[in-house]
Amino acid sequence: MRTVLSILSLVVILASLTAACSAPQPTAASRPPTAAPPRPANPELILATTTSTQDSGLLDVLLPLFQQRTGYQVKPIAVGSGQAMVMGERGEADVLLVHAPDAEKKFMADGHGTSRQLVMHNDFIIVGPTADPAVVKGAKTAGQALAKIAESRSLFLSRGDNSGTNQLELKLWKALGANPKGQPWYQETGQGMGATLNVASEKDGYTITDRATYLANKKYLTLGILVEGDKALLNVYHVIQVNPQKSVSINAAGARAFADFLVAPETQKIIGQFGADKLGSPLFFPDAGKEDEEVGG
Amino acid sequence: MDLIVDGFRQAIALMLGLDRELLRVTWLSLQVSGSATFLSLLIGIPLGTFLALNRFPGRHLVISLVNTGMGLPPVVVGLFVTIMLWRNGPLGLLHLLYTPMAMVIAQCIIAAPIVTGLTLAAMQSLNPRLRLQLLALGASRWQMLWLLVREARLPLLAAVMAGFGGVISEIGASMMVGGNILGQTRVLTTATVMETSKGNFALAIALSIVLLLLVYAINLFLTHIQQQGRAP
């Protein structure tokens, strides 16, 4: 009989868990606010963004501020820029924060977005083993560096996931007139930036990374910065409001509020200071209001 | 090596300090996977019992489907549940995507075949004459089922453990249908993946240790029930 009682008590515990789970989740806005935040008609906002904004910790700083000020409840979905834009195309996201300029231009030209604004940039760097078997260090441009890697058939790790970083890398190979896909020295990880850096480090290979992710992972890597500062290596982030005609469920007002928030001078200042205290140098450079040409995007 | 030591140290510090974020993430893992396991029992035990005790055409086909389902890849479940729950998808009106409820649904789909398959095996391993004897002694159909379930409680609790173990350690579906949203759908496994990609290996190890301790505590509890009153 004791066994039966134990089983019954387990069932009761689990049932109460189910009930607790279906109860509304506490929202960030319901935490003790300094001033009562406004209550938008449709507070749920889906932000499709890249893994770099989440992995660098930037979203953890910006989103609570935005939520507290406007009352919107943001659901950030961190995926590659490629997937983020497909989510926008299908009307599954309201607003995008992405870094794949060519794909973004096509996205806008196809009418999937109503507004695209410059937010910030940082840069990509080419990193590799400190022994540098392909003698990449000192190359003036990213193109030269990749050409040397290809010539010496040194191991190169590609993201291979259609992310913004991957799209930039493929563009650089294309500009060289090279197609390394399928070569034994060219390997695709199919994973995020942090994971790809670890693979490159373990296998003594070269790769292209955004500076923020590299700095965050640096202490566990045996990779050094070999090429930086080339204009072709700029990593530019735009915020895109998804066209509300895609679907009735798109939260256009929320998307506009989020885009306005990102380009507001106060937010831009926070972006410019982010990371400076921990890593010694800022991770992102605010660019709102500038023209794309000014930052090379 | 110093990383693992660091991870242990951080895990102890987080647990002793009752870190709020850690508590929330752990509690949500327990809620989601506990609910999913509970729901999968409601489906799996009756279905497994039905399959064990009845003969009907196509039974082998159904059983082979259940057995295949025991190995359902969580990412596949995650992908299909995501597409169903998309706001422009067939069940979009429910607004469930990126909520804990969506994670419960996905995990329930993962756990239900495991519970069904193991229930089926447990019931079939009972001596078939037991059924006849119970009926001959005048048990009603429901009394007979209850006694059979009681008789099979050892392997049935193993089914509960397997189902729970399968979903609490699952990552692909939770990441896809939950979205790993801070304070809403972040659970121990998705947080571990995220901290790993952030390069916070020590914190990732700390989260893994908490997950293992949680699974151990639950299994200790279930094992205690299972082995109660048994001679060693």
Image: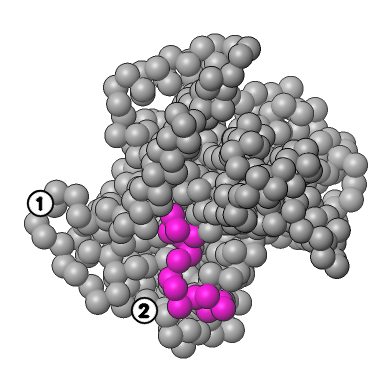
Does the magenta segment cover residue A92? no
- Amino acid marked by disc 2: Ala
Please give the name of the residue rendered at 43% of the width and 40% of the height, measured from the top-left corner: A8
The residue identified by callout 2 is A252
Q: Is residue B49 left or right of residue A3?
A: right
Does the magenta segment cover residue B92? yes
Q: Kindly identify which chain the residue marked by label 1 belongs to.
A: A
- Amino acid marked by disc 1: Thr
Secondary element under disc 1, as helix, strand or loop, is loop
Q: Tell me where residue A222 appears, x and y as whole percent.
A: 65, 23
Which of B208/B106 is in front? B106
**Range of magenta residues:** B88-103
Which of A186/A152 is in front? A186
Q: Is residue B138 above or below residue B96?
A: above
The residue identified by callout 1 is A34
Please give the name of the residue rendered at 40% of the width and 17% of the height, measured from the top-left corner: B12
Secondary element under disc 2, as helix, strand or loop, is helix
Q: Kindly identify which chain the residue marked by label 2 belongs to.
A: A
Q: Tell me where residue A277 appears, x and y as whole percent.
A: 32, 32
Q: Is residue B111 left or right of residue B36?
A: right
Please give the name of the residue rendered at 48% of the width and 36% of the height, measured from the top-left corner: A4
Please give the name of the residue rendered at 61% of the width and 77% of the height, measured from the top-left corner: A106
Q: Is residue B47 left or right of residue A274?
A: right
